Image (tube, rainbow, N blue to C red):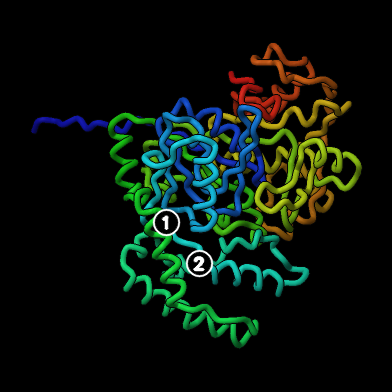
Amino acid sequence: MESKSFSKPTRTATVIVGTQFGDEGKGKLVDYLSDKYDIVVRYQGGANAGHTICFDNKSVVLHLIPSGIFHEGCVCVIGNGVVIDPVALLEEIKKVEELGYDVKGRLFISHNAHLIMPYHKRLDSLHEDAQGEQKIGTTGRGIGPSYEDKFARKGIRVVDLLSPDVLQEKLRENLAAKNKLFRNIYEKEEFDVEELVRDYSEFDKIIDPYVTNTQLYLSRQLKAGKTVLLEGAQGCLLDVDHGTYPYVTSSNPTSGGACTGSGIAPNYVGKVIGVVKAYMTRVGNGAFPSELFDETGESLCRIGHEFGATTGRKRRCGWIDLVALRYSLTVNGVTEIALTKLDVLDTFEEVKVCTSYMLDGKEIHDFPTDHPTLSRVTPVYKTLKGWMSSNAQARTLDDMRPEARSFVTFLEDELQVPVTFVSVGPGREETVYR
């Protein structure tokens, strides 16, 4: 029998993942790389994530639309793994258009993406308030309750908007249970089905030009040789399966989530870029071994403007943690590192790096995956000399201050993954790319 040769997919998809607790600066990297890719896809999360992009003396925060929207030649996709708040999406489309960028014909929304309904937002806030000291630290944007309905097979998807009868039937079923909660448990006003149907039918009219079968679209584009950049929200340590559970988000920010959240097959993925902030931050509750409670922590917060892009909440700050990073790099299969916000460390005489933990009198190098154990570890630090000057004009590693270069190479040696991108300032051009 004659042998047949089968063509293999070209690995033209790249995944960008956060390797810490989110807020690593993924937006700048996606913006920086977008002009080198044909399509940018957001694959999970919702309007609880904010990606800040600085260009042309402007600072813009995006929550749902992929960060590549500010490059005219780039197509943007909101994948099936995202939960969409219609109000937030329409506000964002308006914001982008007001800045002079076309959205129609450049933004596609998966017909299988789930919607965040008004009752999800209310449930999120009520449930969080009821937790007292056990609060997770949710943004109250309805993300968790929307994902709960998704996995309970009761979710409302974008495709449901095409049929008012189907939408009404699903809403009646959902509200029959949820209105009992609002009425009997929380003593709140019930939601009206007809009003929600009217509101979301209007939403459908507006977004209908953007809705498509994005899985099919992306598959055809990849087969045609187009390049795709997959953009995650939050970070690995907040992944519902691999993070510091239960203090996590409700989706999979890890690289595996890029495939399920977009419909792109794994064998199209060639690179996984792990975004690493030069220090560490966390929003909300949960263990944070390298957190600083002193003036240094306050300085990191102040210099780094560490306030949530979505909620404005102050972020907890600490030194970079290589124990957590080794775990994240392994889980995500990271092939290269993008180091961000190095400029925040420009004025420090010393810079510390957590290289291991102490647990019950023993030194450990592996990240504990259960939260109670992680809460008991103490960090072991190595102190490096600071560079005490700006690297904002640097465009190559050789242009950087020797101590800053030493910091980068120390991370590479410890993590055994190359650093190919260093952000030396907030601007698009303030970048060292190797």
Quadrant showing the C terminus: top right
Which label sits in the foreground, 1 or 2?
A: 2
**In the displayed image of the protein, which residue is found farthest to the left?**
1
What residue did someone put label 1 on? 113
Check residue 117 in the rendering and tell me which mark sits there, or answer none.
2
* Pointer 2 local density, CA inside 10 Å: few below 14, some 14–19, many at least 20: many
- Asked if residue 269 shows in the view, the reply is no
191 horizontally vs 10: left or right = right
Q: Position of residue 433 (x, y in %)?
A: 59, 20
**In the displayed image of the protein, which residue is found farthest to the top?**
398
Q: Position of residue 292 (x, y in %)?
A: 84, 45
Quadrant showing the N terminus: top left
- Asked if residue 249 shows in the view, the reply is yes
Please name the amino acid that badge 1 sits on.
Answer: Ala
* Pointer 1 local density, CA inside 10 Å: few below 14, some 14–19, many at least 20: many
Check residue 383 in the rendering and tell me which mark sits there, or answer none.
none
